[in-house]
Amino acid sequence: MKNEQPTPIDDKQRPGKLRADHMLTIETRIAQQMYNGRSRSKNKEYITGFNRFGGLMSKLYLRASMEDPYFDYWLIEIEELIDNTLMALKAENKKLDELLHSHSKLQLSVPESVNPIKVRLGFRNPYGFRAAEVLMEFDELCKRLNAARHTARITTEQFHRIRQESSKLIRRLFEQPKKYPEKGMIISREEYRQKTRKALEAIKQFGELPDDVISGQRRASYAPIIKQSAYFGVKRGPKKGTVSLGNTNKKQ
């Protein structure tokens, strides 16, 4: 029998772009409010929502990819804050689950929305998706709080206290990127080591950086690949990190 060889693929024929459809389900009104944030008015201050957080993080993520050590360091700070916030919310959810299932002959359930909201996620950075995990955990916490109060597992005072404390954690996380500059000079690690004029100005404004950040030894777990050197203007090889994520929705 004649051996059949696979037909080669024409080099001119290329696969299309990869696309994905990422969705987040929201079941409580307060989680929806955290998603949207709040516009500034005469009597109320502006509150950064989940969507705005993702957009701000895309800018920080891009600056970190240009080898600016300060933005690399700020990604580490935000990553630690995300981890701590998520840990605190999961701990509260675990406590409430134990209260709701403390009696074997009393079956109590966590309520679910009859009409949940589904929103499409389209972030250009991993931190928007990590924040989505935080918002999801907060949404689950609000559902458990309602169940625990309704079934007398917690008091009304406990309900309001836990919800308020948890809401503060979310708002603190979403406000964090606003502490960092969106625009301005970009310095490289080499400039920092040489203590150039730009580097000295940055140190005066933002303080000294840890040695392991300057060396590149310590980067955020989801730090971007370094695309180019801000100092030399040449391409560099990839360093620890992940590429940014895309999707079919409007880019943030």
Image: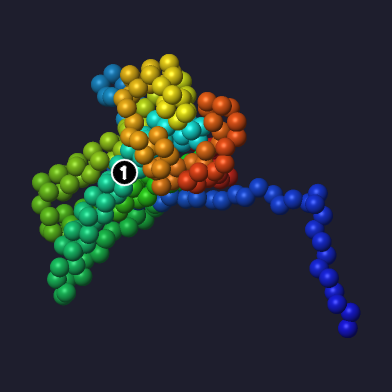
- Residue appearing at x 52%, y 25% in the figure: 231
| Left or right for 191, reference 208 | right
Closest to the observer, 252 or 205: 205
Coordinates of residue 63 in the picture (x, y in percent): 48, 31
Rendered residue at 36%/56% (across/down) = 114
Q: As rendered, which of 120 and 183 lies closer to the eye?
A: 183
Tell me the kind of residue under disc 1.
Glu
Q: Which residue matches tag 1?
A: 80
Horizontal arrangement in the rendering, residue 84 relative to residue 201 (left or right) = left
Indicate whether 33 appears above or below 148: above
Report which quarter residue 7 is drawn in: bottom right
Picture coordinates of residue 32, whole percent (x, y): 35, 42
Q: Quadrant of residue 102?
A: bottom left
Counting from the top left corner in percent of width and height, residue 91 is at 22, 55
Q: Is residue 197 visible?
A: yes
The type of colouring in the image is: rainbow
The residue at 46%/34% (across/down) is 64
Q: Position of residue 169 (x, y in %)?
A: 25, 41
Crowd band around label 1 with a 10 angstrom C-alpha radius: few (<14), some (14–19), many (20+):
some
For this view, does 200 lie left or right of residue 150? right
Which residue ends up furthest to the right in the rendered image? 2
